[in-house]
Image: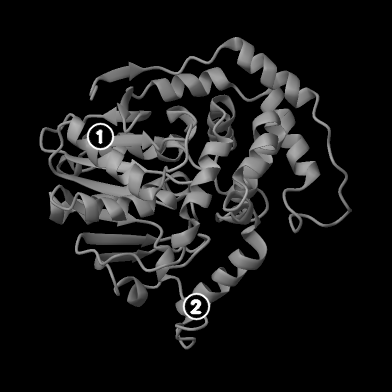
């Protein structure tokens, strides 16, 4: 097996950017009934303005330079090239930490936390809290490129991450993730338990309260059930499509940048602390950079396939884990985990409930994530 690790640099051909500009200018826009707002999906008026900003004012080359400021690499694992950012801390006793995003995220989620985690001394923190930071892109997502076959699941990605950390020479490390990344991070504590010191999650999907198991006298459990209903009957249409016919949606998302923009930006509005528009919660250019990584790599379909590959286990209790597990709960996330339910099959050592933030915690509230990660892992170095 070739274990070569190769330096990687993003360098998008100008022809690809010119093609994007042309496609944006030639968009055919749908009609929309007046006054529906966000109820039927992302509104035409908002999306037209956002697409025009993307076409005329957003600066991909500036974003490319920002991304390339982080050391990036690729290595082949299980037949697929894995892209990852790897920032070694200047502190010799730093703890390795692998950060995993979910859908529709990318490494953009973590750009504001990498520096403070890797070099707390330079960011007003305690150097004893330093991490060697590894941010891989799951196969089928953005810079790891499209997968060409089925079978890429949480378990397969988890095994690839364990191999990646071994290949980087890390015999003891921590793991953090949200959304799909929470599933991978938790499973790392199972399949690579001898090397994983602890895990830190922002999602525990199997710990949401239901009508059957909720204690409705507890406000958090009542809200958890309400969130479950809202997701099932209002927000979950994208998951129903990606979990049944991912190829169907891939045609539009791969051919139309506005379709790709709408598909992702709607999630940044519905799953965050945004009041009126996604930019209430996340930086506009950062959101567009996230969209660009999907568009330029043609990974709409391959990232969506993870939903179909994982449908059989959605909501099912995971195997018991004895790995020390910390959970950070953001109130505006799409699901609200309940500690007593999480404790059924997890070794919960820390449970933090924030008063702000949503699904993209590290992107929306980087300071909260940085602090919680530092405090979580102090006992597991």
Residue 333, visible in the rendered structure: yes
Kindly indicate the quadrant of the structure image that contains residue 234. Answer: bottom right
Q: Earlier in the sequence, mark 1 or mark 2?
A: 1
Picture quarter with the N terminus: top left
Query: Where does label 1 land, which residue?
Result: 164
Residue 96 pos. (x, y %): 20, 39
Name which residue lies at 23% across and 56% down. Answer: 190
Kindly indicate the quadrant of the structure image that contains residue 57. Answer: top right
Vertical comparison of 314 with 27: above or below:
below
Q: Is residue 249 left or right of residue 322?
A: right
Relative depth, front residue between 75 and 61: 75
Query: Where does label 2 land, which residue?
Result: 210
Count of numbered tags: 2
Name which residue lies at 53% across and 75% down. Answer: 225
Q: Is residue 212 left or right of residue 372?
A: right
Vertical comparison of 138 with 358: above or below:
above
């Amino acid at each position: 097996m070739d274990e070569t690790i190769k330096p990687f640099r993003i360098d998008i051909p100008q022809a690809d950017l010119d093609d994007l500009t042309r496609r944006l200018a030639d968009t055919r826009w749908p009609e929309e009934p007046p006054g529906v707002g966000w109820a039927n999906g992302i509104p035409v008026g908002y999306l037209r303005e956002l697409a025009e900003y993307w076409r005329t004012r957003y600066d991909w080359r500036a974003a490319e330079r920002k991304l390339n400021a982080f050391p990036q690499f690729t290595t082949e694992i299980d037949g697929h090239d894995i892209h990852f950012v790897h920032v070694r801390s200047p502190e010799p006793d730093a703890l390795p930490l692998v950060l995993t995003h979910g859908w529709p995220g990318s490494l953009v989620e973590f750009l504001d936390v990498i520096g403070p985690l890797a070099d707390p001394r330079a960011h007003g923190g305690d150097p004893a809290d330093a991490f060697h930071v590894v941010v891989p892109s799951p196969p089928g997502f953005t810079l790891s490129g499209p997968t060409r076959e089925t079978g890429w699941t949480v378990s397969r990605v988890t095994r690839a991450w364990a191999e990646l950390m071994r290949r980087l020479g890390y015999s003891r490390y921590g793991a953090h993730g949200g959304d799909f990344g929470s599933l991978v991070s938790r499973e790392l504590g199972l399949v690579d338990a001898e090397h994983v010191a602890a895990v830190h999650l922002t999602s525990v999907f199997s710990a949401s309260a239901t009508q059957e198991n909720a204690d409705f006298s507890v406000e958090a459990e009542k809200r958890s059930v309400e969130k479950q209903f809202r997701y099932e009957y209002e927000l979950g249409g994208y998951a129903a499509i990606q979990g049944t016919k991912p190829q169907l949606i891939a045609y539009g998302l791969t051919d139309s940048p506005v379709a790709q923009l709408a598909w992702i930006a709607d999630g940044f509005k519905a799953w965050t602390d945004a009041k009126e528009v996604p930019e209430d919660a996340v930086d506009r250019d950062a959101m567009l950079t996230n969209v660009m990584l999907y568009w330029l790599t043609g990974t709409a379909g391959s990232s969506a396939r993870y939903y179909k590959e994982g449908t059989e286990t959605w909501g099912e209790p995971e195997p018991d884990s004895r790995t020390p597990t910390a959970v950070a709960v953001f109130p505006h996330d799409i699901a609200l985990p309940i500690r007593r339910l999480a404790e059924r099959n997890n070794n919960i050592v820390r449970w933090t409930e924030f008063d702000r933030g949503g699904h993209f915690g590290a992107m929306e509230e980087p300071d909260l994530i940085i602090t919680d990660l530092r405090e979580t892992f102090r006992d597991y170095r």
